[in-house]
Structures are given as C-alpha cells and as structure tokens.
Amino acid sequence: MVLSHPRMMVASVHSFGDHEEPARRLATALDSPWRPINVRRFPDEESLVRIVPQKGTAVVYCPLDHPNGRLVDLLLAASALRDAGAQPVVLVAPYLCYMRQDIAFRPGEAVSQKVVARLLSGAFDRIVTVDPHLHRTHDLNDVFSIPVMQLSAAPLLGAAIASDNPGEEPVLVGPDEESRPWVEAAARITACSSLVGRKVRRADRAVEIEIERLDIVRGRTVVLIDDMVSTGSTIRKATRLLLDAGATRADLYVTHMLSSIEDTAALYDAGTTRIVSTDSVRHPTNVVQLAPLLAGALSG
Ligand code: R5P
C-alpha cells in the first residue's frame, strides 16, 4: 500500500560505506548530494559514528538485513544528524528487519516487531520501506508511532519479467499464499497465467509445497515470484516440483534476496535458471534498481 505524504525536498542522502552504491543512486535520483556515515570500531567493539553535518531533510539509506550489528550504528547516526540540525531525519530502509515476529508464539518470547518499531520510531521522523514481510500486521502505521510509507516492488518485478521474456508467455508461480499479491501484480502487468501453491513449513529448512493445475507448466518457462528468499528452501522445493512436472526452465524474481552464497548455489543446483532480485539487499543477483521508486515516494 502506498500512503500519501507531504512532498519532501531532500538536502542530503547519508549511508554507511557498504551501501554507497544504491545510496548514491538514490541521491542522484533526488538530485541531492550523498554523504558518508563513518564508523570507527573500538577494540571492545563499541562504535564511534560520524556523519557529515546537515540542516534540512536528511535521508539515511540503510537496508536492514543482518541487522543486529547495524541497528546501533544506525541509531547513533540518526542522533548525530539530529544534533547537527537535520530535520526531519528520514530512514529509507528498503528491507526492514524483524517484521515477522509480531506476536509471542510461546510464553517468554520477545515481540521483536514492536521492539524494533519503538526503537526506530524514537530515532527517525519517517520511514520509507519496500515490501515489508508482514504476517498478521497489515499496516506498519499501526505499529510505528511515526509515518511509514510501504512501497511495493511487485510492478517493477512484473515489468522486468515482461522485458526479459519478449513474445513469450511464461507461467507465473507463487510458491505459497503469502506470495499471491506479488504474483497477481506481475500477472496484471505481463498478462501471463499464474499458479499459487500452498506451503507448510516444518522447520527453517524443511517445507512441503503443493501446487494444483501443475499440468499447465509442461513445456513452458515458469517464473517463480516471491517477496523474500532466505534459506531458499521454499524456492528449491517449488522449482523441483515445476521441473518434474515438465517445465522447461524455472526463473526466480524476488524483492529481497537474503540467501547466503551457499544457499544461492543450492538454488541453481536445484534447477533455477536465472535469479533476478531488487537491490533492496546487496546480493550478486541484484538487477532491478529501486532508486526511482524510492525517490518518487520521497519527492512525489
Ligand atoms: C514466506 O513466508 C515468504 O514469502 C518466503 O517464501 C519465505 O520467507 C522464504 O523463506 P526460505 O527461503 O527460507 O524458504
């Protein structure tokens, strides 16, 4: 869902060094300068964070994959920007962490989504994110106490599928019910037929998948679509089912590609032909750049 927010003139885009490339792309799209956030790690592993002082609207670009170490540095950077006179301080986190644990499933468990929402709401004035991986929460504005703009990369994935398959009609496949919105959005753009499977997860790396009407994939290219790939177990299982049913190739288009190098290699071993991900999380499969989408949301 895209919420409407007032137009913002962005004075500068700040990022840690490992996100320099996508942050610079965002800065270019906004016609704003990029500024580094420098981190010095002390021997005891505390951080000294230094920003380039800025007045006006400061955007901090920071995907929150592998978040545990990053969160503290991010809070320190936001505080330093505020101390230097930046206002508002906006977090652009194309991937937002800890969004799945939205209730305590067993007594004693932390409700991580609420904790992270409270932390980030205390540090920033606004957040822009893409395809947050939500289960029972539908609108992050119910959880954060600052405005959150939730964008979707589904139209960009649909457009990439259409341009990568000219004159062809691949079958679009979502491996589970949660992928349905992405598959349906891509199906509207590509006018391709689609299937959505059902998944039962037994453990982090053990899933069972059923897909009905599998006969329609015989002799066809299939394109799997999902919001997130983590261990790759879901996509591996779905890919095997589709290839065993006679699909000639199985491509994967995904917003957030979180898989390790080993898990990504296992996807190719399972028969995945091509992987296309957005640059929401830095990964060798990044093809689709989110900067225009993010810039449009910030300035539109
Ligand atoms: C389901 O909830 C998600 O859309 C993904 O299918 C899931 O997070 C993928 O996880 P993994 O790659 O570990 O199977």
Image (cartoon, helix red, strand yellow):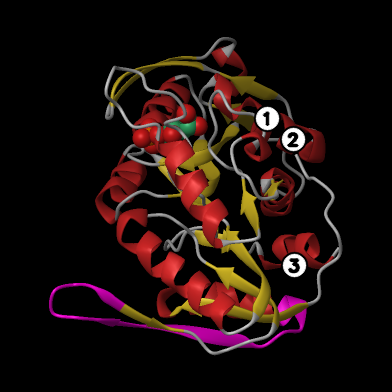
The answer to the question of whether label 1 and label 2 lie on touching residues, with beta carbons closer than 8 A, is yes
Q: Nearer the viewer, mark 3 or mark 2?
A: 3
Residue at screen point 63% across, 45% down: 145
Give the Cα separation between the discs numbered 1 and 3: 23 Å
Q: Which residue is mark 1?
A: 181
Three-letter amino acid code at disc 1? Pro
Say whether mark 2 is within 8 Å of ligand 1.
no
The answer to the question of whether label 3 and label 2 lie on touching residues, with beta carbons closer than 8 A, is no
Q: Secondary structure at mark 2?
A: helix
State the image coordinates of residue 177 (x, y, percent, origin top left). Answer: 57, 20
Any part of residue 66 in sight: no
Residues shaded magenta:
28-47
State the image coordinates of residue 269 (x, y, percent, origin top left). Answer: 30, 43
Q: Which mark is residue 185?
A: 2
Q: Earlier in the sequence, mark 3 or mark 2?
A: 2
Three-letter amino acid code at disc 2? Ala
Does residue 137 appear left or right of residue 74 in this picture?
Answer: right
Three-letter amino acid code at disc 3? Ala
